[in-house]
């Protein structure tokens, strides 16, 4: 059977377009956030806080003063912080057009979003209210001989309350979870397209949309619950694995390798089939990818605004009740890593929820630890020359 080589190359080229546009979009994003001296200076100060292991909210008053002195508007200030606290990777820039057209496309995707919310409530009932997720976490801790502890991320605290609901910096935080959701949606359609092999693509889209909403509901509830900043400690290998990153480590290889296999297989099948159309297939793939990204960020934004805080607090209460983990600080002092227990997780969360969190002085901000550029790592004393 002859292969439509020209159609295959055109289809592969269309699929490669987001990858080719990712680098220019990354550069455009840097210009959007800001590249001037004032922005660079403010970014350096925030990065200094993040590298030290402190929470940004502990320096909020000082950061506001510094931003005013640098003539950085509050919205721009929060955008810079969001870009540092929730950095965008290559997979995010592949999907960045979905964020830029979000207001209009979210309205178009509203019917699908409204249909999908009952699935989320069902998954929330099963995973959170029926304590299934905490039982899975306890079983993982026991079987893997790990221990669950609490290490708060730099953006935790009361500073988030200053943001507007529609502010662009808040979209960045939710957009951080979108690549998983978008690629999961495309993966769901490719699975249905491969397994069922229906004559009607419209029916395939409907079936895959139902499957996608179920998978997205599970993923959204898990991501929201794991904002509790829990970390697996593996003493045998001497490593710390955040629970949300552990989940990504399980899902990403399955979805990523599955996507590469299914895309290659279906594209070759379209090129070999007399009635096939590789260009149309690639166009449909990109349309579904960006459509899944729009639905994913809309789900995330809506669910986080409506149920996110209650789900996270409910899961945190279950973690404290069943596991009672300690809360640690992981700080770096001129190249030295300190890992110190601070208090129980319940005490740490109470401190974060305080209306008047403890503020560090400007001198503390200036004296935050840094690692000089060009600092060489010490030699291994156990290595035999």
Image: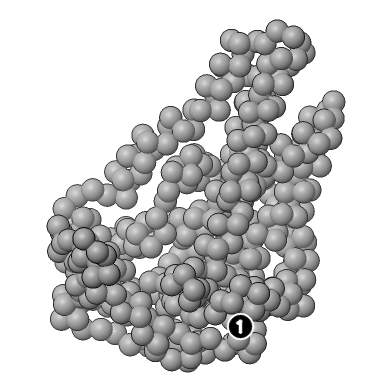
Q: Residue at x 61, y 16 (%)?
A: 8
- Viewer-side residue, 166 vs 195: 195
Q: Estimate the x, y position of residue 305 in percent, counting from the top left.
A: 58, 66
Looking at the image, residue 209 sits to the left or right of residue 350; the answer is right
- Viewer-side residue, 235 vs 272: 235
Q: Kindly indicate the quadrant of the structure image that contains residue 58.
A: bottom left
Q: Residue furthest top?
A: 2
Residue receiving disc 1? 319
Quarter of the C terminus within the rendering? bottom left
Looking at the image, residue 220 sits to the left or right of residue 364; the answer is right
Q: Estimate the x, y position of residue 166 in percent, counting from the top left.
A: 49, 59
Q: Is residue 128 visible?
A: no
- Viewer-side residue, 346 vs 350: 346
Quarter of the N terminus within the rendering? top right
Vertical side of 33 occupied by 169: above or below: below
The colouring scheme, among rainbow, by chain, secondary structure or one colour, is one colour
Q: Kindly indicate the quadrant of the structure image that contains residue 132.
A: bottom right
Q: How many marks?
A: 1
Q: Is residue 348 visible?
A: yes
Vertical side of 166 occupied by 290: above or below: above
Query: Callout 1: helix, strand or loop?
Result: helix
Vertical side of 327 occupied by 116: above or below: above
Looking at the image, residue 284 sits to the left or right of residue 162; the answer is right
Q: Residue at x 58, y 51 (%)?
A: 252
Looking at the image, residue 319 sits to the left or right of residue 336; the answer is right
């Amino acid at each position: 059977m002859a292969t439509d080589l020209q159609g295959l190359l055109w289809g592969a080229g269309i699929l490669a377009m987001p990858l080719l546009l990712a680098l220019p979009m990354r550069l455009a994003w840097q210009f959007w956030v800001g590249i001037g001296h004032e922005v660079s200076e403010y970014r350096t100060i925030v990065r200094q806080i993040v590298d030290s292991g402190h929470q940004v909210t502990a320096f909020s008053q000082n950061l506001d003063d510094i931003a005013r002195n640098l003539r950085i508007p509050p919205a721009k200030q929060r955008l810079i912080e969001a870009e540092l606290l929730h950095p965008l990777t290559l997979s995010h820039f592949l999907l960045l057009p979905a964020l830029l057209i979000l207001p209009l496309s979210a309205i178009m995707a509203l019917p699908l979003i409204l249909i999908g919310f009952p699935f989320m409530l069902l998954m929330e009932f099963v995973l959170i209210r029926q304590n299934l997720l905490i039982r899975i976490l306890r079983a993982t801790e026991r079987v893997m001989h790990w221990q669950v502890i609490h290490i708060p991320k730099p953006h935790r605290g009361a500073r988030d309350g200053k943001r507007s609901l529609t502010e662009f910096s808040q979209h960045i935080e939710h957009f951080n979870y979108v690549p998983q959701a978008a690629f999961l949606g495309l993966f769901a359609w490719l699975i249905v397209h491969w397994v069922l092999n229906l004559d009607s693509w419209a029916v395939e889209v409907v079936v895959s949309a139902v499957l996608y909403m179920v998978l997205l509901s599970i993923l959204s509830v898990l991501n929201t619950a794991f904002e509790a900043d829990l970390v697996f400690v593996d003493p045998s290998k001497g490593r710390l694995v955040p629970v949300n990153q552990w989940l990504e480590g399980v899902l990403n290889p399955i979805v990523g390798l599955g996507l590469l296999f299914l895309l290659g297989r279906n594209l070759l099948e379209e090129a070999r089939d007399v009635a096939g159309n590789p260009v149309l297939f690639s166009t449909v793939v990109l349309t579904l990818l960006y459509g899944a990204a729009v639905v994913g960020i809309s789900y995330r934004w809506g669910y986080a605004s409506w149920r996110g805080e209650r789900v996270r607090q409910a899961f945190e209460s279950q973690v404290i009740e069943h596991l009672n983990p300690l809360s640690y600080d992981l700080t770096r002092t001129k190249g030295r890593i300190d890992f110190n227990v601070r208090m129980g997780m319940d005490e740490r969360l109470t401190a974060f929820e305080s209306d008047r969190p403890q503020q560090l002085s400007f001198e503390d901000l200036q004296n935050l630890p840094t690692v000089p550029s060009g600092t060489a790592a010490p030699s291994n004393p156990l290595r035999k020359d």
